[in-house]
Amino acid sequence: MADMMQFDLVSPERQIASTQVSAVDLPGAEGDMTAMPGHAPVVMTLRPGIIRATEGGNASEYVVTGGFVEVNAEAVSVLAEKAFPRDGVSRADIEAILEEARAKVEVAEQEHKDIGEKLVADLVHLLEMME
């Protein structure tokens, strides 16, 4: 089994990362997960959170607001709604995204409010993680 895997992180605006890594920590909607070389294939939804890609002893962190990830034995591919290198995003940036989400929940039809409220809660948790 190889000791490295390809990690790609893209958003609609641009490619954020493309590198070889030994592990990727992912904020899954159903729970956090670490993908490593040889991982079984899986596709899952991401919640707002921090992705940590480890290469050797160095870790790169990225803030995502949600999206999807596909994992297989050789690669992790993340399609993020919005993504930023952690050192390239401020608390104010995330607060603006949070306020936008809160405004959408206010006008959402009742059947969609639960999903919106979960997103708001996840964004609040992300802000706490960034402190």
Image (cartoon, rainbow, N blue to C red):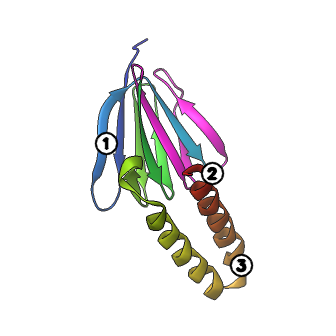
Q: Are marks 3 and 1 in contact (CB under 8 Å)?
A: no
Q: Evaluate whether residue 42 shows in this view.
A: no
Q: Which residue is mark 1?
A: 17
**Residue at 28%, 50% in the rendered image:** 15
Residue 116 position (above or below residue 79): below
Q: Secondary structure at mark 2?
A: loop
Residue 9 position (above or below residue 5): below
* Extreme residue toward the bottom, this view: 107
Neighbor class of circle 1 (other Cα within 10 Å; few <14, some 14-19, many 20+) is some
- Of callouts 3 and 2, the N-terminal one: 2
- Of callouts 1 and 2, the N-terminal one: 1
Q: Which callout, 1 or 2, points to the residue nearer the camera?
A: 1
**Residue at 31%, 48% in the rendered image:** 16
The amino acid type, in three-letter code, at marker 3 is Glu
* Extreme residue toward the top, this view: 1
3D distance between C-alphas at marks 1 and 2 = 21 Å
Residue 27, given in percent of the width and then of the height, sits at 57, 45
**Residue at 49%, 51% in the rendered image:** 68
Q: Which residue is mark 2?
A: 29
Q: Secondary structure at mark 3?
A: helix
Residue 124, given in percent of the width and then of the height, sits at 63, 62
Residue 51, given in percent of the width and then of the height, sits at 48, 42
Q: Which residue is mark 3?
A: 111
3D distance between C-alphas at marks 3 and 2 = 19 Å
**Magenta residues, start to end:** 30-57
Residue 55, given in percent of the width and then of the height, sits at 38, 24
Q: Secondary structure at mark 1?
A: strand
- Of callouts 3 and 1, the N-terminal one: 1
Neighbor class of circle 3 (other Cα within 10 Å; few <14, some 14-19, many 20+) is few
